[in-house]
Image (cartoon, helix red, strand yellow):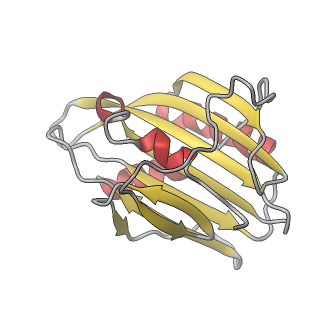
């Protein structure tokens, strides 16, 4: 399941909306006390201490890196993850990358309740946020509602990092997944 969640996490990214930063749906925030600092594909973030690395296959490209961490499975068999892809020579800017991710999420997962916003993010030249929900089948045969949140960052060196967190809506806040995304720092 973690591989499935990680693969779907790769499909997410970000687009535009208000972008003034005052009422943003995602703002940079310090990690909760006791979390573990991590570096994934050149991005710093923090996760609860029980999250573990999982195998990732980066997308095609010589200068693309990818890494992921997964949280423990819940009683419903659903888990979650954070997945980071960094490209040294992206083909789209953050806004266009987000638009593409939204299209992919809608076409492949039936993304619903979509929220998009352009952001200002410390250390990035441009940033975009995307959130949506989709129902995914579990091994039990039941569908579980998942939330996807993605932060796409255009970095001063010309590279781009896409950070996606995904997990079951029923435990999303409890497991701190939004806080994982808010803890992202670059260029430090």
Question: Which residue is at 69% across, 49% downward?
Answer: 152
Residue reaching furthest to the bottom: 62
Of 20 and 69, the residue lying toward us:
20
Where is residue 143? Give x, y as percent: 27, 30
Question: Which residue is at 59% across, 43% downward?
Answer: 150
**In the picture, residue 47 is in which quadrant?**
bottom left
Of 66 and 179, the residue lying toward us:
179
Where is residue 127? Give x, y as percent: 76, 45
Question: Which residue is at 31% across, 60% downward?
Answer: 49
Of 22 and 170, the residue lying toward us:
22
Where is residue 4? Give x, y as percent: 37, 52
Q: Quadrant of the C terminus?
A: bottom right
Where is residue 16? Give x, y as percent: 77, 31
Seen in the picture, residue 39 relative to 29 is either above or below; the reply is: below
Residue reaching furthest to the top: 113
Q: Is residue 153 left or right of residue 169?
A: right
Q: Is residue 158 left or right of residue 142?
A: right
**In the picture, residue 99 is in which quadrant?**
top right
Residue reaching furthest to the front: 33
Tally of marks: 0
Q: Is residue 36 left or right of residue 64?
A: left
Seen in the picture, residue 60 relative to 183 is either above or below; the reply is: below
């Amino acid at each position: 399941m973690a591989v499935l969640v990680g693969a779907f996490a790769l499909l997410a990214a970000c687009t535009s909306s208000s972008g003034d930063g005052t009422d943003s749906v995602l703002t940079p925030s310090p990690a909760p006390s006791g979390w573990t600092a991590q570096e994934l594909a050149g991005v710093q973030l923090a996760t609860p201490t029980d999250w573990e690395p999982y195998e990732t296959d980066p997308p095609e490209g010589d200068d693309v890196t990818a890494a992921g961490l997964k949280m423990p499975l819940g009683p419903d068999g659903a888990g979650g993850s954070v997945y980071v892809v960094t490209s040294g020579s992206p083909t789209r800017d953050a806004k266009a990358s987000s638009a593409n991710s939204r299209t992919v999420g809608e076409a492949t997962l039936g993304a619903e309740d979509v929220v998009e916003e352009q952001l200002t993010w410390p250390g990035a030249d441009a940033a975009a946020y995307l959130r949506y929900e989709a129902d995914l089948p579990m091994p039990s045969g039941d569908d579980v509602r998942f939330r996807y949140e993605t932060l796409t960052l255009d970095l001063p060196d010309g590279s781009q990092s896409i950070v996606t967190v995904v997990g079951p809506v029923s435990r999303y806040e409890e497991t701190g997944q939004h806080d994982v995304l808010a803890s992202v720092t670059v260029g430090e």
